[in-house]
Image (cartoon, rainbow, N blue to C red):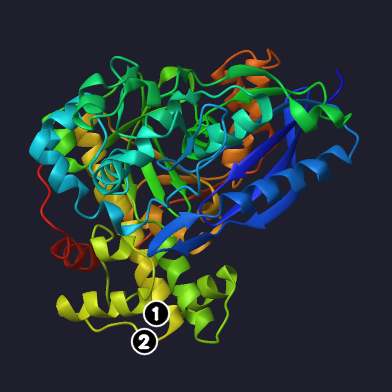
Amino acid sequence: MSATHYLAIDLGAESGRVMLGKLEEKRLSLEEVHRFPNRTLSEKGHLHWDLGHLEREIFAGLEKAAALKLPMAGISTDSWGVDYVLLNAKGEALGMPYCYRDSRTEKSPERLFRRLPFEEIYAQTGIQFMAINTLYHLEAQQHDDPSVLAGADHFLTIADYFNARFSGVGVVEESLASTTQVYNPTAKAWSEKLMAALELSPTLFPKIVPSGTVLGPVTGGLKTQAALAEAQVIATCSHDTGAAVAAVPATGKNWAYLSSGTWSLLGAELPGPVITDAAREAGFTNEVGLGGTIRFLKNIAGLWVMQECRRAWEAGGTSFTYEELTRLATENGPAQAHISMKDARFLSPGEMPEKIVSFCRETGQKPPETPGAFVRTILESLALTYAETLRLLEKLTGQKIDRLHIVGGGSRSELLNQLAADATGIRTITGPVEATAIGNVLIQALALGQIESPAHLRRIVENSFPTGTFVPGTGLTDEVRTRFQKLQPSVKS
């Protein structure tokens, strides 16, 4: 059997990549063709994604891929969730998209809940409350300047925007639709009740398609590139976490996943949504995965906190690689302080070391003083949050979890992996690191008939990429767990 080649465009909040996937027999290999930083711009006091920069870098990566002179069977984009591009009737972008971390949604929930209580919003969507969600950005835009949305023909989420640029077909794939908090996973459609509460026309909301939908052949300039001319554009799991979870090399039941990166997303793959009062009060969310499965999960602030500390130290004249920071945290030994990853201050950019210091002082802890101590505080706090989240997951699903699969960039950190095993008390399996790109490529192959089923997809992952195993140790004492629990806001469950 000859090799088949695919291109995955993987866009994250910190960086983007164009990845080449080569599928031959039962093995997949990946090659990075082009990597570039993602970036935000400040305009009139608001934070936007630099859409022009993304477009230039993506098309530069596609040119590099075409130069390899390998015929591509498929192309697909995945991205972070929530954010969107407004377009006119010709499919042209109307300005730069807002970044989900922009402060314009600060008052949106309060205004929206006066029209529709959150209990009803959760019943419609099964999505946890986060002010970054698309729902609140749409409300903010309607409140601040309704003429903007009135002048738009439709919106597309970030990955779906680029898939439309390649294919000319403007739709939203259901895994990304489910991150907006305007999608009803039971009805498998946009929520009429929420569109009415936002006072928005249903025509603004595009058609939703299942994961693994073939949109059609490449169009425009891509057809002039011989290697790309016959490629099909495919909506895989356009949400990066959806693609990553599809690539978890797990079998059977009783396993949980952790997509570890800027965000930590921890949950289980279920056949249907869990939309209960207990799930709502515990802050769990129901997002769609491959084959209409539900990723029942909780969003945790993740390595964003460490990334922001690194940026702050670099701005102050001291640069560290992530490997150096992990080494310093290991050498530091056990943390003397911890933070609550649920505290809202850790979700916004800027001055992260100062925010950690202020939290520690407010909670009667001695703040960390060195980069190693800061990072150890962050990583231990993350691991302890994983353990707390797993306990809630078991209670809400009635399922006993005996394995935790960690995928994504964070799975490179042996210290964090071991701390996760120590905190959760269960076997922790790490890898693959590039789960999102792997899932993107293999869902393309599934859509084009080269792979038989999602289970077959996972067997290919297991055959193709190394994994690691961490067993629980004694790195986190009961005293540490008790002290950490006292820092957390009370949660009904």
Dot 1 and dot 2 residues touching (CB under 8 Å): yes
State whether residue 475 appears in this view.
Answer: no
State whether residue 405 appears in this view.
Answer: yes
Residue at horizontal 29 percent and vertical 38 percent from the top? 135
> Left or right: 36 with respect to 49?
right
| Amino acid type for the residue under numbered disc 2 | Glu
Residue at horizontal 48 percent and vertical 79 percent from the top? 331
Q: What is the quadrant of the N terminus in the image?
A: top right
- Tell me which corner region of the image, top left, top right, bottom left or bottom right, holds residue 451: top right
Q: Secondary structure at mark 1?
A: helix
Residue marked by disc 2: 369
Inter-mark Cα distance, 1 to 2: 6 Å
> Left or right: 85 with respect to 198?
right
Count residues near mark 1 (Cα–Cα under 10 Å), then give few for <14, some for 14-19, many for 20+: many
Q: Nearer the viewer, residue 371 or 392?
A: 371
| Amino acid type for the residue under numbered disc 1 | Ala
As displayed, is residue 148 above or below residue 412? above
Residue at horizontal 50 percent and vertical 32 percent from the top? 88
Q: Position of residue 240 (x, y in %)?
A: 51, 39
Residue marked by disc 1: 373
Q: Position of residue 268 (x, y in %)?
A: 36, 33
As displayed, is residue 16 above or below residue 254? below
Q: What is the quadrant of the C terminus in the image?
A: top left
